Image: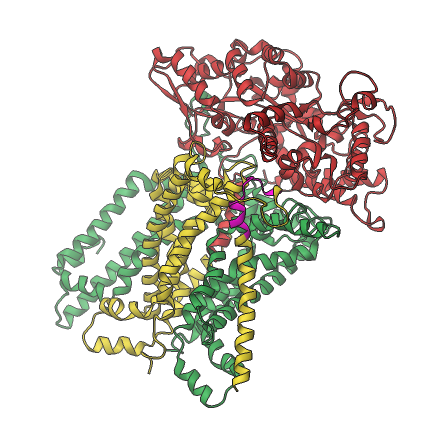
Amino acid sequence: MKASKVADTCVTYIILLAVCFIFFFPCLWLILASFSKSGSIYSFEGFFPSAYSLDTFKTLFTDTAMYNYPRWFRNTLFIAVMSCLVGTFLTILTAYTMSRFQFKARKTMMKTTLLLGMFPSFMGMIAVYIIMTQFGLINNMWGLILIYSANAPMGYLTQKGFFDTIPSSIDEAARIDGATNFQVFTRINLPISMPIIVYTTLTSFTFPWSDFILPKLLLKEKDLYTVAVGLMSLGDTEFARFAAGAVFIAVPIVILYFCLVKFMVNGMTAGAVKG
Amino acid sequence: MKKKITALVLSGVLCAGLLSGCGGDSGQGGGRSGEGTGQAGGEASAGANTGGVDLSNIFSGELEQNVTIRVLENDTAIEQGYFRELIDAFNAKYADYGIVAVDANMDQYSNLADDGPYGYGPDVLYQANDVLMKYVEGKHIYPVPAESLECFSQIPENAWNAYKATVNGVQYYMGVPVNVQSSMLYYRKDLLPEDWETTWDKNGNQVPDMVENWNDMYRYSREIVAKNDGHYGYMRSLYDVYFSSGFLFSYGGYVFGDNNTNADDLGFSAGNAEIGANVLLQQAALMNEGCIDDSITVSAYSKLADGTYFATMTTPDVYTLFLKELRLAYQAQGMSEEEAGALAKENLVITEIPKLPASGDLTEENPELIPLKAMGGVNGYAISAYTKSPNACLAFVEFAAGYEMMLRRNEMLGIVPARSDVADAVGGVSEIMYHNLDAGNIVVMPSIRAVEQIWTPGQTFFEDLAKDAFRPEAEKKYKTLDDIKNGLASVDVQIYDAVHTLAGTN
Amino acid sequence: MCLMGLGQLMYGQVGKGLLYLAVLALGIAYFIFRGGADLAGLFTLGTREADTWLGIEGDNSVVMLLMGILAVIALLLLAAVHVSNVRDARETQKLLERGGRPATFQEDAKQLLDRKFYKTVLFLPILGVCVFNILPIVFMIAIAFTNYGGSIVPPKLVDWVGLDNFVQITTLSQFAPTFGRILGWNLLWAVCSTALNYFAGLGLALLLNKDCVKGKVFWRSFPILAYAVPGFITLLGFKFMFSYGGPINQLITAAGHRAIGFLDIDAKWIARLIGLGVNAWVSIPSIMLLATGILSNRDMTLLEAAKIDGATPWQQFRRITLPFVLFSTTPVLLGQFIGNFNNFGVFYFLRGGLYIDGYFLASDTDLLINWLYNLSISNNYYNIGAAISLVIFLITSLISLVIYTRSASYKEEDTFR
């Protein structure tokens, strides 16, 4: 029994190491490339640069005449944080409602959302652009926030799947004690649902954070560029700067992950509420 | 995840500049501009003809007072500080009228057809001729009274032709040419054989033979490769239609018929184009697999600098990038920045592209030589039709296209001016290219919309051709000239299909 | 009853009555000032062509189409409010007949936080989805029945053409063979990549959930790192990595071998496999994240009971964990399938710009959506693009709707409650 357990642990760690290598190696490559001294990726021998320096990061943040990375970063942060807050709120509420309430249009709505998500949204972009011109929201970061937030609830089915696994007996007990639906949601279900809320927060932050299309479409002024658009506008030989920008763009998401991760796994202490 | 996927889908959409507009000439439009160029040979009569638009209704000649005009320039001009200088000089001159030119602060490739109608576009745009001419059909840009401009007589007819359009039977100039763009040869002078003056200068003109004709370039490349120490001679990614199609043009190929205006007539396989393609095939054999995809294109800057490549072919506007890489390479060897900069400037040579053998055989000795007709473009200024102050815009364009600003532009950006007086004054590359344009050795990119469809089929063919040099003997696809001809013919079919298959309902 | 809110006012429900009245007034004002013209514009799609040179500010057909659709949606909403108004009044009437007392405004408002909480909550999301999701989709469907595209883009006037676009697609003889080939590969791709991503993501989450793994946060951060890099950067990076001048080929040539064309013109299956791998790299972290969240909600008592009964880990997984996870992630699985079916980015970035022999304007790694892009978008034939999307949509939606409505997640929503 004990030997098999040790073997099991070993195998687990070997697989883990392999997986981590697969995921980490391309990232490491990007990170080291961003510290490359020459700035051109073709001076590398094999995967990695031959000499390192901090220069690229220095230029990334100080040489802002043409490529104003700090500004892009601030813009992106603003857009992503606002859309994340509003989007997460709307998504969780929608998912919860669709999971807990029984009303006539419910099943139709579920099927409809599934179908809507399936449309190849190529063409829809023309419409979105025209809507925004009519609302006068071109060159306006709030326009983007509006779209991201409005589209966020479309993904509610995932969260609903989670809420479906929370026993309704808890709700009923609370309702017998005289709690309104609103209270049941905020006081009881919300705390249990931390893992899925964290997941939602992460995804609804990441999407605006790394989106390229909508900002490109709606923000024409260079001062309003987001990091993704800005990076795409970099010149041919700016690879190290590109890599540096791409590495730095990942930092907030990693930080966010480390802040939220503890809620992720112990949202519901195993089996405690069940029963 | 789903969202991320959607995002990618859309990124593709954007790349194509999907949004409403994107007008450009249709197949019919192509036919009409066909007439236009027909006329272009004769008298170009821009303006107030019967049936046409009287330009004096648009450009009254009376400058608007106290207006701001937003100018879209290209990134290099802004980065190198030229644009700042330009608008400062302009603003100082027109301070009395209160006219202020500012940076439109937009993407240099932004599409006026998307932005203009909704009021977000710039007033004056600097873009390539094929891009600017796409705006004509939707009348997103104003015609310019070119003949009344100071620069009119200084700019060669071939450059003006790129900006001529016929609307309702009347011919107009749609912009003002500023800069000629085409292929040039870049090479490292210090990588020439030491005794080149005696062994590689048969005609004794003090120019190494290998940069004068492709046969000697081939011979020299073979010598370098034969040493087998990882160094190469001439290197260039061959998939790129912009650079590779010139070899087809030199032997009778063309893109569209009727001077690049008839999208029904595809000419990649016309004449003896297969001979040109065979030249590329011979060149590929002396390169590495990097010529199949874009590897050489993107790595050329540093590989030329570290001496791995002896020469490459690209446009003159990236000269500063090559120079910078070479300087850095020298600095890495321990030179001071100043020293390295000077040495780089001396050793990096940019010159006219070599001549081709009429036979297409790169191994032939003392061949009869013909010029390489390279694809090129003419960048210039156009005035948005959505501007509130067309006269001020015209004043700006005239100012920017004037002798002094063009000269300054050349000095700061290294671009090739479209003005003959400037080209003559600065000499060198500019003069060469200017005269190539004048002599018709630069095939200006077609200005009809169908040109968007030539890239993928062309790219596929050139990639296949380059790959063939590295296929094992038994798997080779292009063994004879006939094979190549058939390959080019299928490129023509693909382009035709891409242009016409879906045009039915329109 | 024809005037909205009148009924409520009559029964003394002043607040509610005024609200209904206000909605009606707003609606009428909208239709007088804007909506009416928009509605008419939907039929004509513009009558006056713009000409900037002559200073004619004409009609923009595309804007008119969109605003027309918006007006129709507004009309439908108004109708819905009217129906609810009539129903409400009738219920109040019945209540009165039974001797009840009509609810006060405050009571109604309270209801909205309790029994009708869902109405309060769903109002904003539905509004947002209508404007930014449904409206564009309806717009796109409408485009499939117009001649918008090619040379007919504003300022040219667009017209309705009925089914012409569909007739054109079906009569093109080059279409059928390519369509068949691409559809086959597309289905294979969608199935393989969905299975790979889903099970690898789930497996990773389970692996990291094992008791013997110490430092879970640390281990988990590696996939997160991959997740944190924007998708397009990842794809560009991988494309470079596998290119002829990329690091992999550098190592191969340095070792004295011939460079390998991972993504070049002859690389059909290698390129497909690389696409599969790269897509997995991009997708697995988010699935892992989700699965981790869901697994934390597992009923551990069941598992422990199973352990005591001597079930092997595999049995535990098969019988308890998998059904649970499958149940709560069916929508995700479906979303993944659809997302992969319509995965434009992977092959566009990795191996774009190729037309292979035997395919009509497509390459052998292209999915239907890439082909659609080649055919329509890069040509600006929006109408054809919309028509083909509609056809693809009908196929995919039928498949997924059948799967979804038969899944436990849809039919037995309270299995695990």
All told, the count of numbered labels is 0
Question: In the rendered image, which quarter is residue B248 located in?
Answer: top right
| In the rendered image, the vertical position of residue B183 relative to residue A144, given as above or below | above
The color chain B is rendered in: red
Residue B7 or C306: which is nearer the viewer? C306
As drawn, which residue projects farthest toward the bottom? C309
Q: Where in the figure is residue B232, as x and y percent of width and height?
A: 74, 37
Q: Which chain is green?
A: C
Q: In this image, B93 relative to B10: left or right?
A: left
- Which stretch did the figure color magenta? A29-42
Q: Is residue B73 above or below residue B486?
A: above
Residue at the outermost front position: B334
- Residues B247 and B340: in front is B340
Q: Quadrant of residue B32?
A: top right
**Is residue A41 located in the magenta-colored stretch of the structure?**
yes
Q: Quick check: C111 left or right of B494?
A: left
> Residue sitting at 34 percent across and 58 percent down?
A88
**What hue represents chain A?**
yellow
Where does residue A3 sit, x and y in percent of width and height?
55, 84
Towards the viewer: A219 or B166 = A219
Of residue B474 and residue B303, the one placed in the foreground of this image is B303
Q: Position of residue B477 (x, y in %)?
A: 81, 46
Residue C394 can be seen in this image:
no
Q: How is the image coloured?
A: by chain
Q: Position of residue A123 (x, y in %)?
A: 49, 46
